[in-house]
Amino acid sequence: MNQKIEEQVDGLLEKYTELLLGESSPELKEKVKLWSLYMHISKSMPPLAQHWNQTYPDAKEGIKEIIAEIKTLNEAHRSKNK
């Protein structure tokens, strides 16, 4: 893959994380990346997400924790900016 594209997409992810959560860090960026990928797949190909959830119940729980954390951080960020 083109390194320039990777760097530019990484910058996009960093800004998205910052706008979504009010801050960005490598850990938060990785969580937002996993969250956004999973949410996209679950909406665009629900049977695939369901199959994955059944095949990897531990990972499903991990994704649920990430989703809850992203939601909580986003709500806190939005309430600070009202």
Image (cartoon, rainbow, N blue to C red):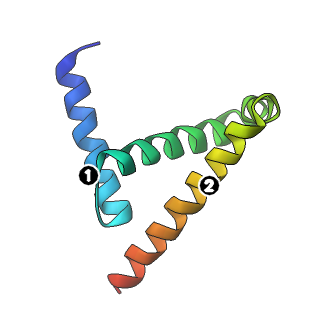
Which of 26 and 1 lies nearest the eye of the viewer? 26
Q: Measure the C-alpha gap from mark 2 to mark 1.
A: 22 Å
Q: Tell me if residue 51 comes above or below residue 69 in the rendering.
A: above
| Residue most extreme to the top | 1
Point out residue 16 in the picture as x, y percentages from the top left corner: 32, 52
Kindly identify which residue carries mark 2.
Answer: 65
Kindly identify which residue carries mark 1.
Answer: 15
Point out residue 54 in the picture as x, y percentages from the top left corner: 82, 33
Residue drawn at x 62%, y 35% as measured from the top left: 41
User: Helix, strand, or loop for circle 1?
Assistant: helix
Point out residue 66 in the picture as x, y percentages from the top left corner: 56, 52
- The amino acid on which the numbered mark 1 sits, given as a three-letter code, is Lys
Apparent side of residue 23 relative to residue 37 in the rendered image (left or right)? left
- The amino acid on which the numbered mark 2 sits, given as a three-letter code, is Glu
User: Helix, strand, or loop for circle 2?
Assistant: helix
Callout 2: 10 Å neighbours few (<14), some, many (20+)?
A: few
Closer to the eye: label 2 or 1: 2
Residue 18 occupies quadrant: bottom left
Apparent side of residue 6 relative to residue 17 in the rendered image (left or right)? left
Residue drawn at x 71%, y 42% as measured from the top left: 60
Callout 1: 10 Å neighbours few (<14), some, many (20+)?
A: some
Q: Quadrant of the C terminus?
A: bottom left
Residue 12 occupies quadrant: top left
Residue drawn at x 70%, y 47% as measured from the top left: 61
